[in-house]
Amino acid sequence: MMASAWSVALVGLDGQIVEVEADIGGGLPRTVLVGLPDTALYEARDRCKAAVSNSAVAWPASLLTINLSPATLPKTGSHYDLAIVAAVLGAADQFAASELADTVLLGELGLDGRVRGVRGILPATLAAAQRGFRRVIVPRTQAVEAQLVDDIEVFGVASLRQLLALLRHDPIPDEDELRADDSAEPDRTSDVRSRSLDLADVAGQAEAKWALEVAAAGRHHIFFHGPPGVGKTMLAERLPGLLPDLGVADALEVSAIHSLAGVELDSGLIMRPPYADPHHSASMPAVIGGGPRMAKPGAISRAHRGVLFMDEAPEFSSGVLEAMRTPLESGVVFLTRSQMQTRYPARFQLVLAANPCPCGKFGTPGADCRCPPMAIRRYGQKLSDPIRDRIDISQTFRPPRRTRVRAGLDGGESSATVAGRVAEARDRQARRLAGSQWRCNGEVDGPYLRRHLPLPDGLDAVDDALDRRLLSPRGVDKVLRVAWTVADLAGVDRPLAEHVAVALAMRRGEPSPSWRAVS
Amino acid sequence: MTGQAAKRLGTHGEDLAVAELERQGMTLVARNWRCRVGEVDVIAEETVNGRTTVVFCEVKCRSGLGFGDPLEAITYAKVRKLRQLAAEWLAQTGTQPDAIRVDAVGIVLARGSAPVVRHERGIGG
């Protein structure tokens, strides 16, 4: 007697269909699980057995062989429980085995037969729908998440008894609601927080706010530099609030990553750009992604299509900072482990903030910096040239003067006003870049920028800077991108010389005297 | 369950097992054969097409499924022990059969329902 059920193995965000076969044969009662399972999966054998016995169904007392196919694909995690139980009970003729056709099962079982939530329901359901499966059975608490996927019927089950009733076409028995503490507190993204943060709360720093607006409009990486307490962190936290909503395709991708990272999606797709701000003590796996055998998404992937803010950037370990070089350019990160190469999208907007020296007072007129010159140099060098070269906008903060603070008590424009201008600039970009694979100036690659878009005026200044080694060739492209964004914000169809000059100054981290003129 | 009751249940189970083996056409050779290695519950002979097979049979009897299926209690160590016993029996009796086999019979004697007897052939691998 044999039966097959279907589940999904996730490698990064890509799902592969796994066939779970169960065979009941003669011999002393024994349950064998084969097909390259990891420890959590191997334990499924005992978990499923207890869950079945406690649901008043007999576990077959014979030689029971469970195989997960393709046998060469390493399988991890506990979400195969439902498929294993379904295959076993199908082989034991508890219901018609044909019920399992075209159905993907995902979920972990408790010993009492309760179905528990698992990570990655959304990407797994997406994979099932793409392969033409008609039905997916998931833990009831996660049915909302699975329903975000079109073209597949979703059933949520709270217990093994409900699963059996569903497969036998019996009336579904009621189950007590899961206790609230059964599922971990949903790990909300900082979305609610970012909405309550308003640009008007930040006193002064008009130039930095404008730099932030440019960064938001073109998705440019930005570096905030200045003494402590002048508003670097406050401004960075307000960046997500300036960004427009995600498109549906992006939202699905972002939600899939968050599902994999264990965020509950019970309120629907994540429509707002995500925000990740790892502490500077964060390890390489925490930031880049990693873990043994199968790599999990890190902060750079959780910030995909959103903002990655690294406060006190020089305090991060240099290994972590340097590891961001490739994903910064390519927008993806490949994590290679002994068994698998995993690919995670990581097209994030980087915001770095740094003090000028360990004490933070260096360069501030009138402040008494006591850091030895060597320490100041070393601190500055923590952010290596290759990393700095990938930053489009460098913004130096100056301590506000008294009158400015007073005048800035009302804080100037609100986030909503700025977000409106950002949205308009994004529309211009989307229209110009329609037909290409990009949507924002910050993402467009160099050749397209130079060949397919009109060249801006006033490139002499850029050539000059290149000749004098003040700019790298990469830097030239960065200046062009920012110039386009400045022009988009100004509502001009082609960047003028003044826009290029501003972009060059922003790139070089020089105070730009003319920023007010173009804004 | 006291030792006495367990023993009675075991003996009753063995009776049922012998009946089952005889129903299948086997001849009883010995019951509860003991030596220094241990004990075989039932030894029987089966002749098919003129070939004689000596069957060493372990009998497990339980009064319910509360502790799992009786056959589940037969471990790998027990099977290995049965093979040792088979060798010992052949040596001591000087028998030279065409083949030997290790079987198991599991019996569930639930109160108020008919006994369920399951016979598994060739568990010795």
Image (cartoon, rainbow, N blue to C red):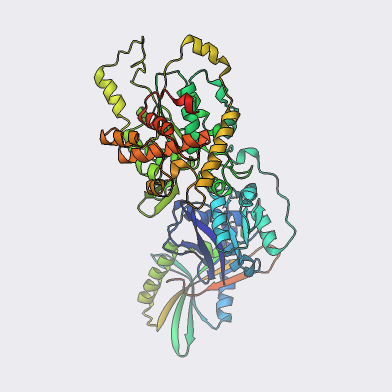
- Measuring from the top left, give residue A208's x and y in whole percent: 46, 24
Can you name the residue that lies furthest to the right here? A171
Tag count in the figure?
0
**On the picture, is A179 further left or further right than A340?**
right
- Quarter location, residue A51: bottom right
- Measuring from the top left, give residue A64's x and y in whole percent: 52, 66
Answer above or below: position of A494 versus B83.
above
Q: Going 39% across and 23% down the picture, which residue do you hit?
A: A511
Can you name the residue that lies furthest to the left here? A374
**On the picture, is A288 further left or further right than A193?**
left
- Measuring from the top left, give residue A346's x and y in whole percent: 44, 44
Answer above or below: position of A411 versus A342.
above
Answer above or below: position of B29 versus A57.
below
On the question of residue A119 being in view, the answer is: no
Quadrant including the N terminus of chain A:
bottom right
On the question of residue A91 being in view, the answer is: yes
- Measuring from the top left, give residue A127's x and y in whole percent: 54, 57
For the residue pair A22 and A51, the one nearer the viewer reads as A22
Q: Going 50% across and 53% down the picture, which residue do you hit?
A: A435
**On the picture, is A373 further left or further right than A404?**
left
For the residue pair A271 and A395, the one nearer the viewer reads as A395
For the residue pair A107 and A154, the one nearer the viewer reads as A154
- Quarter location, residue A35: bottom left
Answer above or below: position of A379 versus A477.
above
